[in-house]
Each structure stands twice: as structure tokens, then as C-alpha cells.
Image (cartoon, grey):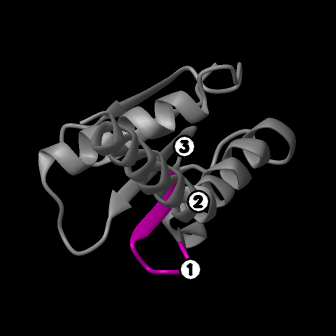
Amino acid sequence: MKKFIYILIAAAVVFVSYNIYKMHNLFKQTDYFVEQLNTTYDSYGLKGSSYKHYTNDGKYKVEPLFRLINVRIEGGASEIEYEILRTILDWHYALDRRVNDVYICGYGTIMIDCRY
């Protein structure tokens, strides 16, 4: 029984690590926009959609709007998938003072709040 538990824990660690590795490209995209709001732009304004990026696998669309960064899962997703994504992004930005909040928007997408 102990052996089964150790195998289960090892499989869970590998699964989580692999998914975090896959999220690296999403973090790269969101970090880029957060950094730009800190160094280059005061705001992306209403034309932020012209700056939108997609992750390499095409699973996520990252689009700035004013001082918010919208993250959408392409191809439709459940509320649970968005809640998991929100939690992961919240952990990623937990110690970043440039990000005030990470929340689920009323339309079901994730917003990274970089407002003053």
C-alpha cells in the first residue's frame, strides 16, 4: 500500500511539473506585458487588442487593455479550468508588486490588474 501511495505522489508531482513547464510560455507572454506597463507604456488604451499575443501552442490569448491584461483560453473552457488558471497566475504574481490582483472577469476570462 505504501508503494502505491509513493507512486501516486510521484505521478502527481510529475503531472504538476509538466503542466507548469507548459505554462512557461504563458508566463513569458504575461510577464512581457506587465514589464511593458512598468517601463514603456503608461497604458495600452482601447487599442490594446492590436498588441495581443498567443502562446506557442495557441491555447491562450493574452491581450492588454488599459492597465489590465486579459488572458483567455482558446477553444472554450469550463469555469473550473479558468479557476485553475487564475490560481496558477495568482501564485505566479503573488510577490510582484506591479500586479494588484488576478481575478476572473465577468465574461469568464482572467484579468491581471496592473492599475496604480
State the SS at label 3: loop
Disc 2 to disc 1, C-alpha distance:
13 Å
Q: Residue at x 48, y 54 (%)?
A: 14
Question: Percent x, y for residue 48?
Answer: 54, 59
User: Which badge, 2 or 1, is on the more N-terminal residue?
Assistant: 2
Question: Percent x, y for residue 5?
Answer: 31, 37
How many neighbours does mark 2 have within 10 angstroms: few (below 14), some (14-19), or many (20 or more)?
few
Give residue 105's quadrant in the image: top left
Residue flagged by tag 3: what amino acid is it?
Phe
Q: Is residue 50 left or right of residue 61?
A: right
Residue, disc 1? 56
- Give the residue at the far left of this rendering: 78
Residue, disc 2? 21
User: Which badge, 3 or 1, is on the more N-terminal residue?
Assistant: 1
Query: Split into 4 quadrants, where in the image is the C terminus?
Result: top right
Please say whether residue 24 is one of the residues in the magenta stretch.
Answer: no
Q: What stretch is highlighted in magenta?
A: 55-64
Disc 3 to disc 1, C-alpha distance:
24 Å
Q: In this view, does 83 lie to the left or right of 42?
A: left
Residue, disc 3? 66
Q: Foreground residue, 30 or 44?
A: 30
Question: Percent x, y for residue 63?
Answer: 49, 59
Give residue 85's quadrant in the image: top left
Q: Is residue 2 left or right of residue 93?
A: left
Q: Which residue is drawn at 70% across and 24% down?
A: 96
How many neighbours does mark 1 have within 10 angstroms: few (below 14), some (14-19), or many (20 or more)?
few
